[in-house]
Image (tube, rainbow, N blue to C red):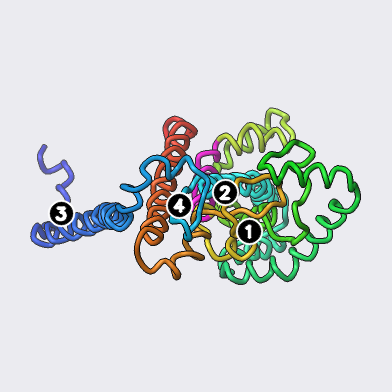
Amino acid sequence: MNESLPRAVKRPRLSYKGDGIFRNVIIGLSLIIALTFLLSIVLLSVQSWPSIREFGASFLTTNVWNPVTSDYGALSLVMGTLLTSFLALLISVPLAIASALFVAEYAPKWLANPVGYLVELLAAVPSVVYGLWALFALKPLFQQVQLWLYTSNPDLTARCAELFNSNKTSLPCFFMPQVPTGLGFLLAVTILAIMILPFTASVARDVIRLVPADQREAMYALGATKWEVISQAILPYARAGIMGGVILALGRALGETLAVAMVIGNTPEIIKSIWSPTATMASMIANQFGDAREGLQRASVVELGLILFFVSVIVNFVARTIIVRLTPKGL
């Protein structure tokens, strides 16, 4: 009776010593990541403490940046960072999803692979190249459009100039330039949207390709059209992964420095029109840190970095929460 039973397969003995070493190494590496996060907060807080002590919460509620009088406020910089990042996402995400659907669902293989490679190649281009391209290719075009708006309606231009001088604006003036320089908020949003597009597009394409073929075939068997398959079978299944790509793009947008600093105008003012110059926290840090050798100016610039750090953490935490809610049950 016992002879008829299959013999138990002998498992190789585990090396408990090696397993313990591997476990300790993994724990140590994980602690290094957590320690780096905490040290970043501590060091930034220590370096920015003079500014925190001097201005307190008013640093986030006032709109002034004057090294001559040692008055600093980050309201316009925080607004500039968030507005440029989210508007760039608003432009780039539909384009990225459309390109991902084209590559994964519509394009033949001989065309899909080169297009996918070119989209991914955009992520490898240095930001300074994007900035130079924007200055030489987009800035003259934007300047011509601004000049046409500036001269086409003299009465509206004069009325808007009065509102701009009094730090006010209106809906028609929101689309009017202050001075036709070509630089400003809209150019920064445009170049930022181009820069972050490949992050969402690459992730979305890979996630769409991972959707089980059974889901597509089941929809087609029920007589669904191509669009119904995409909207009801593919995108709902892939939405969590697509959101992950959006998070990557948002992280790049929030921290992008050089290209934005080259085209945004670097004027710490509340945005009065889509053409007006403004600044982000990252661009202000890049422009001011070299001159801020010591004292309150240096502490204020470092506090901008601390605020940007927390803004990135909060935005990513909210986005991760959204991903968890969007993830289909059972995955």
Counting from the top left corner in percent of width and height, residue 312 is at 43, 48
For image coordinates 64% across by 62% down, the residue present is: 263
Q: Are marks 4 and 2 in contact (CB under 8 Å)?
A: no
Q: Which residue is mark 4?
A: 71
Which is in the foreground here, disc 1 or disc 3? 1
Q: Is residue 87 above or below residue 202?
A: above
- Residue furthest to the top in view is 222
The quarter in which the N terminus is drawn is top left
Side (left or right) of 194 relative to 301: right
For image coordinates 72% across by 54% down, the residue present is: 107
The segment highlighted magenta reads 237-252
As measured in the structure, the alpha-carbon distance from the residue carrying label 4 to the one carrying label 1 is 22 Å
Q: Which residue is mark 1?
A: 264
As measured in the structure, the alpha-carbon distance from the residue carrying label 3 to the one carrying label 4 is 71 Å
Q: Secondary structure at mark 1?
A: loop
Q: Which residue is mark 3?
A: 11
Q: Is residue 221 above or below residue 30?
A: above
Which is in the foreground here, disc 4 or disc 2? 4
Q: Are marks 2 and 1 in contact (CB under 8 Å)?
A: yes
Counting from the top left corner in percent of width and height, residue 150 is at 84, 52
Q: Secondary structure at mark 2?
A: helix
In magenta segment, residue 250 = yes
The mark that comes first in sequence, 3 or 4, is 3
Counting from the top left corner in percent of width and height, residue 248 is at 50, 51
For image coordinates 18% across by 60% down, the residue present is: 25
Q: Is residue 36 above or below residue 214?
A: below
Amino acid type, callout 1: Ile
In the image, which disc is placed on residue 80? 2
Counting from the top left corner in percent of width and height, residue 272 is at 68, 44
Q: Is residue 218 above or below residue 148?
A: above
For image coordinates 85% across by 51% down, the residue present is: 149
